[in-house]
Image: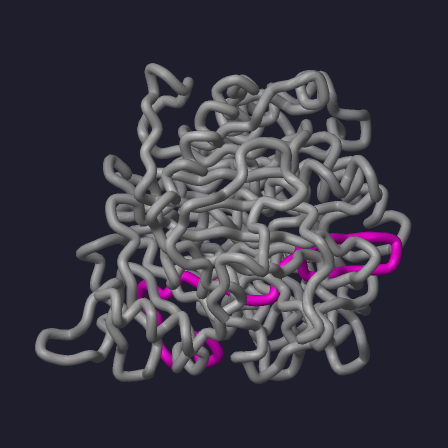
Amino acid sequence: MLSGTLISPLSGWAGPGLEGYTALHYQLTPEQLVQQTLSRGQGRLADSGALVIRTGKFTGRSPQDRYLVKDDQTASRINWNEFNIPISEDSFDRLFHRLIRYFRGKEIWMRDGYVCADPAYRINIRVITETPWANLFCHHLLLRPAASGPADPDWLVIQAPGYQAIPELQGTRKENFSIINLSRRIIIIGGTAYTGEIKKGIFSMLNYLLPQKMDVLGMHCSANMGIGGDTALFFGLSGTGKTTLSTDEHRKLIGDDEHGWSDSGIFNFEGGCYAKCIDLRPEKEPQIYKAIRKGAMLENVQFLPGTKRVDYQDRTITENTRVSYPLYYLDQVQDPPMGPPPRHIFFLTCDANGVLPPISSMDSGQTMYQYISGYTAKVAGTEIGISAPKSTFSTCFGAPFLPLHPMVYARMLGEKVKRYRTSCWLINTGWTGGPIGQGYRIALPQTRAMIAAVLNGKLEKAAFIPRGLFRLSVPEYCPGVPSEMLDPRKVWSDAVVYDMKEQELVAAFRKNFEPFATAAWKEMLDSGPHNPC
């Protein structure tokens, strides 16, 4: 559909109108958007039929250039920190007005969709983009309204990679920016074409609104459902296996990244997936591999020389190669993407120190402590300057997307875990028998066997024994896993060296927790690791 008169793009928002554009492309199909991208020389087709595009200078988010407007409503509510950076109302207004003028004489692409699969929490989103392929991304990631059309939009998102800020005049750090105005219900993104800024801007907005107004916990996790209707959540930072382990041929996927937990249960925020595809192999990620077909969109990948076949091992452009596609591209999907309160929660950590057990049970206090910690480890090669394992913590497994104080989310999780008697587990998908370079990576089939044992009830009669300074309860046996590897200290060739490494990790946990200690309550404080000193 092409229209410059039937639809008012900025209807309902105070400020300048969007005028003078040469064409308005509204609610186009994926096929139309792909063809427009190709005809404008903005992408190519892979042999699978997927569209391949490049996002230019930025191939990932820029957390230092993401702002929240500080005004009378947000000044005392936002947890201002290195992720929640304030910007003035005047700076936002100057950027917004110039951004609207930027579209004069240009084509624009507009899409209406919504977030939150549970109708009780639905929020309608209008997105305006500068390119057809960014609009295709929004088709994939937003929930898609019925053919009769959406209701009036509640939020406006504008993305214009070609528009750059003037830092000295408009209060930004650099030319690129992503700004969330929570009072006016507007997100503006400029100077960067990385589509993840759209996705995470909306996620941050939800993590501000839902806990305060609707008692809904926003979560950076994947979720799936068994044939008996039992749901499970998988939290984890990049590289821990969140997407891999939640994709199970015996269970239906609710979603792979963002969910809400209300009194009614779990619901997906999104309508699609935005998966990493570096080193993608069909035997490891068959569902993702099959989803890369006509209509899907690959970002920043390279072709094998002389072909249109994607080289998923190529890191020339970035480690953060991505693919987006709608949920219905997958075989095992829960429709609608909702489920009852979770029976099990898994925290995934890739412990390159080789200290944590491969599987352990947590009580509610330990769950909240580990949730606040959000631990994993970066290994050599993942970032410039990383030559040895580096302990990494991201509060609630999503610190950059939490506008409120982390204890708000931790308290909500703890209350819900107790109310619904949810069992919580810590899964180490990293190393055992020694740190990286000395020990060995826990095999994926063994990790799958541990999770399956939990989900199938095969550990219900197992005895659990608290182990080590973290006092995590480890089962004496687990089907499909050698019993000797369940206690990591016994797997190390030198127990004394293990004890030293464990003490180092405990010290890192305790240092990370220090900023939260004054706001923590007794149950959480008592659930941290023992002080080895």
Image coordinates of residue 47 in percent, x first then y, are 26, 83
| Residue for point 68% across, 61% down | 268
Relative vertical location of residue 233 with respect to residue 525 in this rendering, above or below: below
Q: From the viewer's perspective, tell me whether residue 291 is left or right of residue 281.
A: right
Above-or-below relation of 70 to 530:
above
**Place of residue 369 in the rendered image (x, y in percent of width and height, measured from the top left):** 68, 36
Asked whether residue 20 appears in the rendered view, the answer is yes
Instruction: Examine the image and state in which quarter residue 424 appears.
Output: bottom right
Residue 501 at least partly seen? no
Assess whether residue 468 is covered by the magenta stretch: no
The colouring scheme, among rainbow, by chain, secondary structure or one colour, is one colour
Instruction: Give, as a single range, the part of the protein colored magenta.
Output: 259-288
On the picture, is 134 further left or further right than 458? Answer: left
Q: Position of residue 398 (x, y in %)?
A: 56, 42
How many tags in the picture?
0
Quick one: 143 or 531, which is closer to the camera?
Answer: 143
Corner quadrant of residue 482: bottom right
Residue 383, image x and y in percent?
Answer: 29, 42
* Above or below, comparing residue 52 to residue 525 in the picture: below
Report the residue at 44% width, 52% height from top. Answer: 129
